[in-house]
Amino acid sequence: MRGHLGVRFAQVIPTLLLVSILVFCLQQLMPGDPALVLAGEERDPLVLEQIRRELKLDQPLVMQYLYWITNVLQGDLGFSWRIRQPVTELVATKLPVTLQLASMAFVIAVCIGVPMGVLSAVKKNTFWDYLANGIGLAGLSTPNFWLGIMLILLVSVHLGWLPPSGYVPLSEDWRQSLATTIMPAFVLGNAISAVLMRHTRSAMLTALQQDYVRTARAKGLPESLVVIKHALRNALVPVVTLGALELGTLLSGAVLTEQVFSIPGFGKMIVDAVFNRDYPVVQGVVLVTATVYVMLNLFADILYVMINPRLRGA
């Protein structure tokens, strides 16, 4: 166990270093000159020169990266070029919003996907199996932005059950906060639940054919106990890894959904930053998202070892 996890821990630092290099270099491919955007309509050459000097844009790319990564290691993600506010403060403001939305979406996905996958595997080649597969296929095929718009028209406009857009923090009013995030969370969780359902079904079909399941049934154990305690526990090993990856996808893939529902999270912030050539914000958001993604992978490895007894002695 220590050896397996030790290797995974050792891979975190070089992975994050490579991510930081990619984040910094790829944003250089963004079209446009941020100095021109900040200079306004007049674009005086002296003003442009001063802006480039202040933002270190007149330095070689390597020096720009070293200056940036040194500040990042000290907890400083720089300042937003557009609103002159520390990126760290922007991240601290927007990250809880996206975390709440992603967490709710993940809970919805697990509560729908895993039971449907188990039911589909246990009831193989029956009506319930076909129904679960049909729902899963629909979830994978439905675009998030289309589903979000349809839910707004049905639930908010026609039925008036939930607000169509906006966001209220949990600290202000938890009921209103849930009301404003339940629809976007369902939209995000819809596709993830379909992925979890298909993988759970596949893993359960494999587990139900194993010798230990036949032995449990031969001992006269109830079918529900055999399915939940013996088959499902072993089937969850690959599903846990997939779940951690999908949670990371939720954190980074909520751009369209946040735009549709006007949720002021990471997605909306990075879209605004890209349009305004606000490189420090883009770099900060992508780097934080990538770091969370890497840490979730590490967490998945830890859970993998805890669930799979064969790896504990490794």
Image: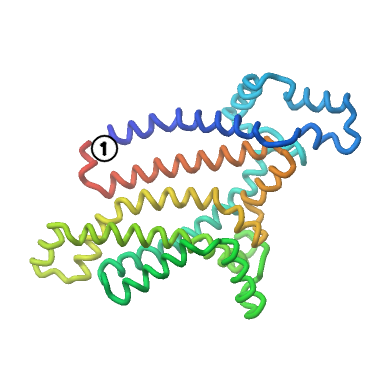
| Residue positioned 67% across, 76% down in the render | 157
Determine whether 260 is above or below 9 in the image: below
| Residue positioned 46% across, 31% down in the render | 15
Furthest residue in direction left, as rendered = 218
Q: Whole-percent x and y of residue 180?
A: 62, 66
The residue tagged with tag 1: helix, strand or loop?
A: loop
| Residue positioned 63% across, 52% down in the render | 265
The local crowd at label 1, few if under 14, some if 14 to 19, many if 20 or more residues have their Cα within 10 Å, is some
Q: Whole-percent x and y of residue 264?
A: 66, 54
Determine whether 137 is above or below 17 in the image: below
Please identify the quadrant where the N terminus is shown. top left
Q: Name the colouring of the figure.
A: rainbow
Direction from residue 274 to residue 292 in the image, left or right: left
- Give the residue type at disc 1: Met
Direction from residue 104 to residue 43 in the image, left or right: right
How many labels were placed on the picture?
Answer: 1
When asked about the image quadrant of residue 79, the answer is top right
Please identify the quadrant where the C terminus is shown. top left
Q: Whole-percent x and y of residue 284?
A: 62, 38
| Residue positioned 34% across, 72% down in the render | 130
Determine whether 120 is above or below 271 in the image: below
**Residue at label 1?**
1
Q: Is residue 174 or residue 29 the one in the foreground?
A: 29
Q: Whole-percent x and y of residue 189?
A: 49, 61
Determine whether 44 is above or below 131 in the image: above
